[in-house]
Image (cartoon, helix red, strand yellow):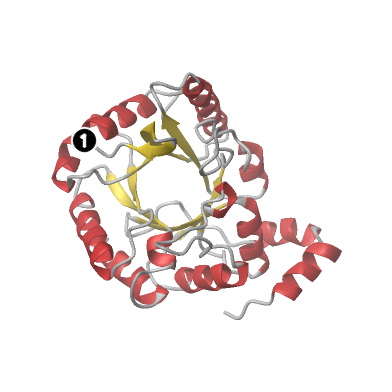
Amino acid sequence: MSISIPDLVKVRTRHPEAIAEAAARRVRRPLVGDSGRLMIVAADHPARGALAVGGHKLAMANRTELLERLCAALSRPGVDGVLATADILEDLLLLGALDNKVVMGSMNRGGLAGASFELDDRFTGHRPQDIARLGFDAGKLLLRIDYSDEGSLATMVSTARAIDEMAERRLPIFVEPFISRRIDGKVTNDLSAEAVTKSIAITSGLAGTSAYTWLKVPVTENADDMAAVMETSTLPAVLLGGDVGKSPRDQEGAYEKWRKALSLPTVQGLVVGRALLYPAEGSVEQAVDTAVGLL
């Protein structure tokens, strides 16, 4: 799809109501289709200032290129939808790229990458009422818990209330939990089996109901640990991708980890961003088709 930034700017400048009109016209679909699996492409990183891919610090900063890559990914068979912040989803709405796709709104982007307040991940993105008003299909939030940071409690409370508000609207919410800590001032997520197990146990018990809660979980450092880890909860889960590294070997290693974890009974699919949109080798289409094949 050819992306014209001047055309998008013109609509936003002169007819901002076109976004709501496009959302109202969008052809919707069930969250989980006939395959019983979910393949979601993620692009909510820029709003947290996380623009790097591999060794390129500003790889996701070019909006034209990002939209082209997203449209290419969404056009591939087996891709169910997209996770992004309001600005990106609204661009895709105006481009007509979201018909018959699952649309997930990213809800908390306040924990900016590298900031002193990174773990104070406030809800600066979609609110539950926004997701309902626009007819989107689900929401996603990030929950990083640092046992040495008292601010993590406030993040947990706001997360629980967001889950409650989404459940009141019967809207699925995908929670991405981590046990995190600062190492030399940098927030690092602990991917050990014990830490991922604890994060799942904590998240599963949040809010007044878990009826609409999904988990968005990383593959553990040792992929063989995932079977035991995923026995912690009966909540449906998807695997997250993240930045898989700079080399094709790193990418192949990620695919192999996903393949193993996708065989587990609670794992229903993949939510992957940079690894597919900016693959270490090959095109977006090839990377997406490979990931879809894992399902």
Choose top left, top right, bottom left or bottom right for residue 64. Answer: bottom right
Tell me if mark 1 has few (under 14), some (14-19) or many (20+) residues whose alpha carbon lies within 10 angstroms of its own.
many
Q: Quadrant of the C terminus?
A: bottom left
Q: Nearer the viewer, residue 26 or 254?
A: 254
Residue 160 seen in render: yes
Q: Position of residue 184 (x, y in %)?
A: 40, 36
| Number of marks present in the image shown | 1
Q: What residue lies at 51% left-to-right and 22% top-to-bottom?
A: 151
Residue pictured at 47% horizontal, 38% vertical: 142
Residue ID for mark 1: 193
| Local SS, label 1 | helix
Viewer-closest of 257 and 59:
59
- Disc 1 marks a residue whose amino acid type is Ala
Q: Is residue 183 left or right of residue 29?
A: left
Residue 292 vertical placement versus 205 (above, below): below
- Residue for point 33% across, 40% down: 236
Rendered position, 112 above or below 56: above
Residue placed furthest toward the left: 224
Q: Quadrant of the N terminus?
A: bottom right
From this viewpoint, is residue 212 visible? no
Residue 80 locus on image (x, y percent): 43, 61
Residue 157 pos. (x, y %): 52, 22
Residue 221 in the image, given as x and y percentages of width and height: 22, 44
Q: Is residue 255 above or below residue 179?
A: below
Locate residue 35 relative to residue 253 in the image: left or right.
Answer: right
In the picture as drawn, the residue positioned furthest to the right comes out as 14
Residue at 38% x, 53% y is 242
Q: Which residue is more in the foreground, 52 or 167?
A: 52
Of all residues shown, which one is farthest toward the front? 184
